[in-house]
Image: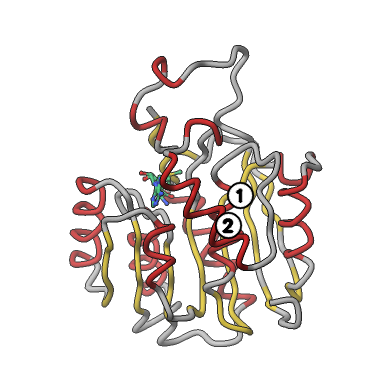
Amino acid sequence: MAEYLWPSMTGLATDPVRDSRMKIAQEVSKEKLRGCYYTGDAIVDACYDILATTIDRRDRLAFLEPSAGDGAFVGGLGRAAKRGLFKNARMTCVEVDEAEAAKCRERLDANKIDGSVSATSFFEWFNGNTGKFDALVGNPPYVRYQFVPEADRFLAETALASFGFELNGVSNFWIPFVLLSFECLRPGGAFAFVLPSELLATSSGCEAHLLQTLKNFQSISILAVRFPVFCKTW
Ligand SMILES: C[S@@+](CC[C@H](N)C(=O)[O-])C[C@H]1O[C@@H](n2cnc3c(N)ncnc32)[C@H](O)[C@@H]1O
């Protein structure tokens, strides 16, 4: 991956999982354990607008949404097409929760977007995927790493090890998500992710991997937002 230069964009938000007191898994809702914080339309639209200024092609793009929820970024792609952006795009979505994946599928249909939704863990999907994508969009799950199901931790760590990344000291699930998503991007592709601002403030080994990886991109735009970016949280 190191030899590729990708134009790119990333949106940053404050960390939604920070809490004054550490909770144990039993005190946290199942949605929070899946890292469910759905992105509001204004942020989604801003992501597509900035993506449009950085990517080298505009039409017939293959998009990947690795943790699609109920399809906020699917709806956004539909609105982008109405603004003349990303026409005839195809979108591959992954969402671990069956019910949310079904809502996401309905949004693909409602927006007449060619695509698919796999109701499975991104890490399982990643193991079976051989395709490369023009663009990545989304908002990865924010889950304290010790709350992540063991099967996912194993898959994430094994996959990342095969690319030379070690997850020692990783604090949150969004980091392996983003690192492996980048491996699905073709050279010349771009991404627009909603990411927590802790990315710029912490220096654990894993975040250092991520910062190092970001240096492979030709340009990075950061849209720092102070207002709430999430339209639905649990
Ligand atoms: C922060 S929400 C974002 C949803 C959507 N991308 C948005 O922006 O509104 C993260 C989503 O990741 C899903 N998720 C959690 N673990 C996952 C996994 N291992 N694979 C795929 N999706 C996962 C959650 O169910 C949740 O819908």
User: SS of the residue at dot 1?
Assistant: helix
Image-based side of 62 in relation to 144, left or right? left
Image-based side of 35 in relation to 162, left or right? left
Question: Does residue 217 lie above or below 107 as drawn?
Answer: below
Residue at the far top in the pictured view: 21
Question: Does residue 89 lie above or below 97 as drawn?
Answer: below
- The residue sitting at 70% across, 44% down in the picture is 168
- The total number of labels drawn is 2
**Residue 9 — which label?**
none
Image-based side of 80 in relation to 229, left or right? left
User: SS of the residue at dot 2?
Assistant: helix
**Residue 175 — which label?**
1
Residue 142, given in percent of the width and then of the height, sits at 52, 39
- The residue sitting at 79% across, 61% down in the picture is 212
**Residue 178 — which label?**
2
Residue 68, given in percent of the width and then of the height, sits at 37, 55
- The residue sitting at 66% across, 41% down in the picture is 170
Mark 2–mark 1 CB contact (< 8 Å): yes
Amino acid type of the residue tagged 2 in the rendering: Val
Instruction: Confirm or reject: label 2 Cβ below 8 Å from ligand 1.
Output: no
Q: Quadrant for the C terminus, please.
A: top left
